[in-house]
Image (cartoon, rainbow, N blue to C red):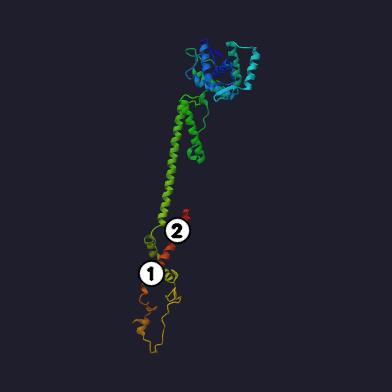
Amino acid sequence: MVASNGGKARYTYAQRVLGAYSDLQRSHKKHAVHIASLRKQVKRSADEKGDPLGPQWKNWVGRAVRTLEDQGALTPTTPKGSVTLTPEAKKVIDHTRDRHKFRGETSPKQSDILWREVSQQFSGQGIKRKKHQTATGGDDDSNDEEEVLGTLRGSAHMSPNKKSRKTPKSLARMTKAELQAEARRLQLAMGDFQRVGHGNDHRTSADPTDFKMQLQAREIELEKLASELDEVKNALANEHDKYMSVVRTPIGQTVVSQEAATRTPQDAASLRVRPAGGLTRTVSGSYISNVSKHPTPAPSDGDPGSPGFTGDEMTGGMDISSGVFGRVSPPPGETSAEHQLLDIERIEELTKERDDLRNEMQAKVGRPFL
């Protein structure tokens, strides 16, 4: 308790809370006291003593209770929202009363001395707070706020603006788990901020406006990161569609035209002797039938002196020495079958080339194509 310029006693909120707790416990004989009852008793005692309270006195009473809990003087108990003295606090009170030889009920002056020394022992200060000269000589909330914040830091003269603030990690460098944890933290912080705005007793930051602006900046950054992820996903989908369109090009368009442009006579010759659809050709070019399992007989030379040999009948009027005659002419009705077999060979060749192209694209992309 420090005398001000107006001659009135100055009390800390820790002193007021401890005095209110003692008054309620003595009058109601209760082991635990609810924080709402503490507020009412603090207001009642302040009116009786002529102790002016600031406009935010309810919040400062709640903060003083939590500070005493952190320092080990009070402890939460049932029912919810109630507190009681710790065994350590009871020992400190008894020791202080014995040192000053306070017996029985104490006078208002003795109570002021008792609770001032008890609160100082738990705060670890034990020094007088610096006098603040005001125009009215009364109490103001800024002095009380400085005192409570100083108690939390271990010094009554430390400015609230000197708190070290850790620079938040960029969202672009966070992992998925860190982003989820950051989102949950922001949701909890926003919930606490909204509850404090409705008058509940919860801890808030020293500058709510700065906290809200910082929260909005985090939300904007989260939205930006989400849009960037969507763009990356769309780009990957477009690349996949592009590769799929190349692989699934119709046979009659790009693949056929490219094969026709790059084919050589040697390739055509090798194609004619390749098995197709289960049919095999001989060296002379005749097909081996799947039914008879025998090749078409090659043209016989015959004996020019034999009675049945006539060159025009065998060659159909063609000159044998010209070199054009390479194989016997197919019988009527066989021409359409040969064309069908050639088409089958062509389809199988294009199918194989398509599979090769698909395997090549699969090796480049790293995923199978249907």
Identity of the residue drawn at 44% across and 59% down: 357
Q: Earlier in the sequence, mark 1 or mark 2?
A: 1
Identity of the residue drawn at 44% across and 46% down: 233
Q: Is residue 236 visible?
A: yes
Identity of the residue drawn at 35% across and 84% down: 313
Circle 2 residues within 10 Å: few <14, some 14–19, many ≥20: many
Q: Can you give x and y, in whole percent of width and height, for residue 203 in the image?
A: 51, 26
Question: Which image quarter is the N terminus in?
Answer: top right
Q: Residue furthest left?
A: 317
Which quadrant of the figure has residue 244?
bottom left
Q: Secondary structure at mark 1?
A: helix
Whether tag 1 and tag 2 are in contact, CB under 8 A, the answer is: no
Q: Can you give x and y, in whole percent of width and height, for residue 228 in the image?
A: 43, 42
Q: Is residue 154 visible?
A: no
Q: Can you give x and y, in whole percent of width and height, for residue 214 in the image?
A: 46, 31
Circle 1 residues within 10 Å: few <14, some 14–19, many ≥20: few
Amino acid marked by disc 2: Arg
Out of 239 and 109, give the one closest to the viewer. 109
Q: Can you give x and y, in whole percent of width and height, for residue 69 in the image?
A: 58, 24
Q: Which mark is residue 340?
A: 1
Which quadrant of the figure has residue 13?
top right
Amino acid marked by disc 1: Gln
